[in-house]
Every structure is written in C-alpha cells, then in structure tokens.
Image: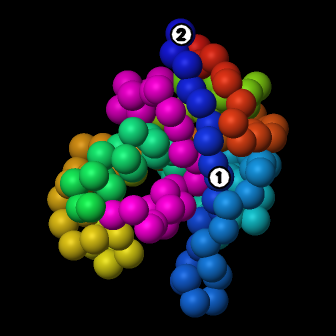
Amino acid sequence: MWKLRISTFRPDTISLVTHPIFEVPAIECIAGRGIRDDRFFDYKNAYKGQVTFFAEETYHALCGEFGVADKPPSLLRRNVITRDQDLNELIGAEFEVQGVSFAGVEECRPCYWMDQAFAPGAEEFLRGRGGLRARILSDGLIRVASLAMLSE
C-alpha cells in the first residue's frame, strides 16, 4: 500500500492565451474518457493520458535547481499534483485514489514546453521524473488535499 496526497488540480489547456491555466478544488474522472472539461476529454479511444500525475517533490527540486520561486506547479501542465508517492512505481499498475481506479501507463515525458514555460534546462532535468500518464478505469470525483490509500 502506498499513500498519495492530492494537493492541487488543473484541467489541461491548449494555449495559455486562449485557455489560461487554472486550479480547481476537484476533478470529475470519467472512465475511458478522461477528466470532464479537460482538453483531452474524449480525445481518442483508450487514450493513455486521460489523466496526468506529477510529484510535488519533483516540483520543489525543479524550483531549487533553477532558483525559481514565482511559478506554480500547474505551469507544468499536469492534472494532479501528488505527494509521498514514487509515480514511476505505478507504471503498469492499477491503483486507486479516493475511490477512483486508474491504470498507470507510462512516464509523462517532459517536452520543450518545460524549457519555455518554466526555465531553460527544465526538460532535461525532468527526464525520468516527468510524471505519470494514466487511464481512468472508474468514474468519480477527486478532491484537493485528501489522503488516499493506493492499492495494486
């Protein structure tokens, strides 16, 4: 059993100009479809990135590495920010957060966006710890700052 602390959420966006990043108190997960109101909702059948997770500890390490104190974790374009969980351990595993079931698919690889939005060099720094892409296996709400147990 692992512990996962949900600390913040943000539906993904297409463009910061036309679709600004914002954090919300809860997200509605729909099995096989994604997060309601997310840009990837109903994107394609069995899409492997229906939800993305990112470790708060990695965010703090990134800030420390680049001396950044003025950029929120939502800027990294991940849906759920976690705490106290090695997300790479969940690749290939089924797990549950607040009663919602997920299947960990693969690392959410960092891209050029990280260098532009966060700091030059962020993409390279995040290789191997860019977060987790997962499929949603059951419907339900996930709320900010709740402690949940994960099970394989």
Residue 82 seen by the camera: yes
Q: Is residue 36 above or below residue 142?
A: below
Depicted 100 relative to depicted 43: above or below: above
Q: Is residue 109 visible?
A: no
Which type of secondary structure does the marked residue at label 1 adopt?
strand
- Relative image position of residue 90 (x, y in whole percent): 44, 27
Does residue 61 appear to the left or right of 29 in the view shown? Answer: left
Amino acid at the residue labelled 2: Met
The dot on residue 108 is none
Characterize the local packing of mark 1: few (<14), some (14-19) or many (20 or more) Cα atoms within 10 angstroms: many
Question: Residue at the location (76% across, 40% down)?
Answer: 143
Instruction: Tell which of 108 and 20 is nearer to you.
Output: 20
Q: Residues within 10 Å of mark 2 (few under 14, many from 20)?
A: few
Front disc: 2 or 1:
1
Residue 88 on the magenta segment: yes
Q: Earlier in the sequence, mark 2 or mark 1?
A: 2
Which numbered marker is on residue 1? 2
Residue at numbered disc 1: 9
Q: Which percent across, then down, holds residue 23?
A: 67, 61
Residue 16 lies, in percent from the top left, at: 55, 83
Q: Magenta residues? A: 68-93
Residue sitting nearer the eye, 50 or 18 = 18
Relative image position of residue 84 (x, y in whole percent): 47, 26
Foreground residue, 77 or 136? 77
